[in-house]
Image (spheres, rainbow, N blue to C red):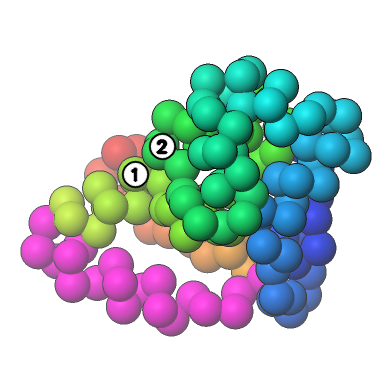
Amino acid sequence: MYAYKGYCMAKKPVQPEPVGDILRRQRVEVLGMGLRQTAQVLGVAPAHLTDLEKGRRTPSEALLGRIAKVYKLDIAILRAGWQKPDSSVAEAATRDATAAAKVPEFLRSTQGLTSEEWDTLIAQAKKMTDTKGGKR
């Protein structure tokens, strides 16, 4: 997996690089592939890939996974760039009425956390759920 400015362990959030710029650079400089060749490997039209790289389209969930694999990028970088949360986020937020009310409030309260602070918060949440009648 590759790291890009604004997506790694920075103490303060940095304005992320547009996902299309990341894709284009990765395709050309790291993979050494042309647009048509990459589109063929992904199973999309070259025009569709151009639109993805220029920010005019967002990929389907299936294409998002193929892009991460072909481009050798962490899927989290792509999800953040296209603002496409993992399906588990929606599942957690709609599990019941309490979750539907509390998950958005919780997520708003976490803005600006560092990776280390997220790790601490996740460990605390796991500890809380583990002590409530065993692991879920």
Residue pointed to by mark 2: 61
Label 1, residues with CA under 10 Å away: few <14, some 14-19, many ≥20? few
**Observer-nearest residue: 103 or 82?**
82
Residue 102 at x, y percent in the picture: 24, 72
Residue farthest along the left direction in this orientation: 97
Locate the N terminus and report the quarter of the image it occupies. Answer: top right
Would you say the residues marked 1 and 2 are in contact, meaning their CB atoms lie under 8 Å apart? yes
Rendered residue at 25%/48% (across/down): 91
Is 12 situated left or right of 65 in this image?
A: right
Residue 83 at x, y percent in the picture: 47, 59
Rendered residue at 71%/60% (across/down): 7
Residue pointed to by mark 1: 87
Distance between the Cα atoms at labels 1 and 2? 9 Å
Rendered residue at 34%/45% (across/down): 88
- Residue kind at label 1, given as amino acid type: Ser
Is 89 situated left or right of 44 in this image?
A: left
- Element assignment for label 1: helix
Q: Is residue 107 magenta?
A: yes
- Element assignment for label 2: helix
Label 2, residues with CA under 10 Å away: few <14, some 14-19, many ≥20? some
Q: Is residue 102 above or below residue 50?
A: below
Residue 68 at x, y percent in the picture: 62, 34
Q: Main secondary structure of the magenta part?
A: helix
Is 7 situated left or right of 30 in this image?
A: left
Rendered residue at 18%/72% (across/down): 101
Residue 36 at x, y percent in the picture: 68, 26
Report the magenta residues as a range. 96-114
- Residue kind at label 2, given as amino acid type: Glu
